[in-house]
Image: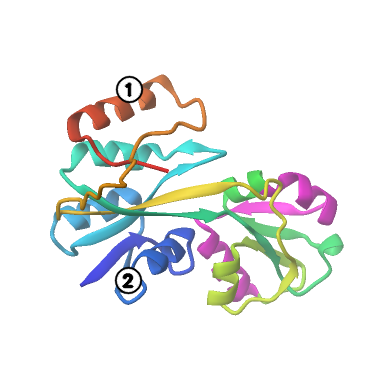
């Protein structure tokens, strides 16, 4: 059995999937919508998706699809979100930084000190940032990547743990068509860390009432 998650290789979702399914083959989708669609199409029996970040709030695309499809939540894990500045040159002389917009936002204060004159080019994921750096091989070009992505693509690091908030955490959930396993110690519940949009809050309440889903931290 293969497990589907948000790609490409080297994303936080990839790391979370390896933690939840260490012995399974992993396949990748380009979007969360695609991951749910392919799971519904029986291409795979399980998938791993991000549900919430303690700084950014709930992932609306995940909530919407959980309401749309009749899947069970079968597992969970969380990752502390850390970033490294990857590259080979002097950060003070950096000209270009490839970064996912959320990643840059979560490291902005630190990066202003390290490379004040840098131009940020947005990417669709931290893994894509790593791939851009790998393709250019220019000492004036850097990428903001996770430790997992750094190791996966064998990239050099010039500064580690450049995130502004070391407690930043993302929660990931395994979903599938098999019924969720319940235990006597299952204390599953929603715990909202941030103020979501009213529409998203209503979606979460509807989802919980509809499925009694074990969305927990």
81 lies left or right of 158: left
Which secondary structure type mostly characterizes the magenta part of the structure? Answer: helix
> Few, some or many C-alpha atoms within 10 Å of disc 1 (few <14, some 14-19, many ≥20)?
few
Count of marks placed on residues: 2
Question: Mark 1 or mark 2: which comes first in sequence?
Answer: 2
Counting from the top left corner in percent of width and height, residue 166 is at: 67, 50
Secondary structure at numbered mark 2: strand
- Identify the residue shown where x is 36% and y is 58%: 30
Residue 217: image tag: none
Residue 26: image tag: 2
Q: Within the magenta stretch, is there residue 89?
A: no
Q: Nearer the viewer, residue 184 or 75?
A: 184
36 lies left or right of 58: left
- Can residue 124 be spotted in the picture? no
Counting from the top left corner in percent of width and height, residue 213 is at: 25, 39
137 lies left or right of 132: right
Q: Within the magenta stretch, is there residue 111?
A: yes
User: Where are the magenta residues, as a range?
Assistant: 107-136
């Amino acid at each position: 059995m293969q497990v589907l998650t948000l790609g490409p290789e080297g994303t936080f979702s990839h790391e979370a999937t390896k933690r939840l399914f260490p012995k399974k083959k992993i396949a990748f989708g380009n979007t969360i919508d695609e991951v749910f669609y392919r799971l519904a199409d029986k291409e795979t029996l399980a998938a791993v998706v991000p549900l919430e970040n303690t700084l950014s709030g709930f992932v609306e695309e995940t909530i919407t699809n959980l309401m749309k499809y009749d899947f069970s939540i079968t597992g969970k894990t969380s990752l502390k979100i850390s970033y490294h500045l990857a590259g080979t040159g002097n950060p003070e002389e950096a000209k270009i930084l490839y970064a996912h917009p959320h990643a840059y936002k979560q490291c902005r204060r630190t990066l202003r000190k390290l490379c004040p004159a840098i131009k940020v080019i947005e990417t669709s994921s931290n893994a894509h940032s790593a791939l851009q750096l790998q393709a250019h091989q220019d000492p004036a070009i850097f990428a903001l990547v996770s430790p997992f992505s750094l190791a996966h693509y064998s990239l050099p690091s010039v500064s580690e743990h450049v995130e502004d908030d070391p407690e930043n955490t993302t929660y990931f959930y395994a979903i599938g068509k098999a019924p969720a396993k319940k235990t006597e110690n299952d204390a599953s519940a929603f715990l909202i860390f941030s103020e979501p949009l009213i529409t998203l809050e209503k979606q979460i309440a509807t989802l919980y009432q509809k499925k009694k889903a074990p969305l927990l931290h």
